[in-house]
Amino acid sequence: MKHFIMAAMVLGFGVFLGACGGQPIKGKNAGGASVYSDVQFNERATDNALGGKRGESCASDILSIIATGDASAATAAKQAGITKIASVDGTASNILGIYSTYCVVVTGE
């Protein structure tokens, strides 16, 4: 009976981690891994020249309970003084569904 209870607890905890790890910041997938992920991806690109400026803005999430930050392209562009956006990329990381970050990286002139 002890082994059955222990197996049920381990399985339940695994399901909990799987549910938390896939999408820690609403609408943004952090790679789909439930233990650890650290991914980079392209959100969109424009016809503007790439330019030499780069801006970044981030948001973070703790236990899918507390989320803070401003991960908008407008904030990233303003931070770097970009007036013509060439590309918008993203980075996301997740540790056990406990702590997650999502950042927007903007390049342009």
Image: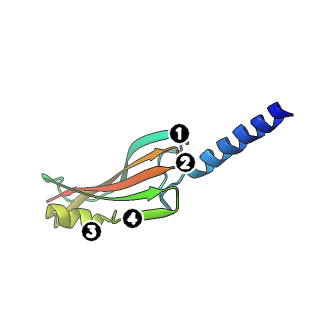
Q: Earlier in the sequence, mark 3 or mark 4?
A: 4
Q: From the viewer's perspective, is the residue at label 4 or at label 2 nearer?
A: 4
Q: Earlier in the sequence, mark 4 or mark 2?
A: 2
Q: Looking at the picture, which amino acid does disc 1 mark?
A: Val
**Measured Cα–Cα span from mark 4 to mark 2:** 18 Å
Crowding at mark 4 (Cα within 10 Å: few <14, some 14-19, many 20+): few
**Measured Cα–Cα span from mark 3 to mark 4:** 17 Å
Q: Looking at the picture, which amino acid does disc 2 mark?
A: Gly
Question: Which image quarter: residue 5?
Answer: top right
Residue drawn at x 13%, y 60% as measured from the top left = 109
Q: Earlier in the sequence, mark 1 or mark 4?
A: 1
Residue drawn at x 39%, y 54% as measured from the top left = 102
Which residue matches tag 2?
21
Q: Mark 1 touching mark 2, by CB under 8 A?
A: yes
Residue 74, disc: 3
Residue drawn at x 49%, y 52% as measured from the top left = 29
Which residue matches tag 1?
35
Q: Looking at the picture, which amino acid does disc 3 mark?
A: Ala
Crowding at mark 1 (Cα within 10 Å: few <14, some 14-19, many 20+): some
Which residue matches tag 4?
68
Q: Position of residue 55 (x, y in %)?
A: 21, 57
Q: From the viewer's perspective, is the residue at label 3 or at label 4 nearer?
A: 4
Disc 2, SS: helix
Q: Earlier in the sequence, mark 3 or mark 1?
A: 1
Question: Which image quarter: residue 43?
Answer: bottom left
Q: Is residue 37 left or right of residue 54?
A: right
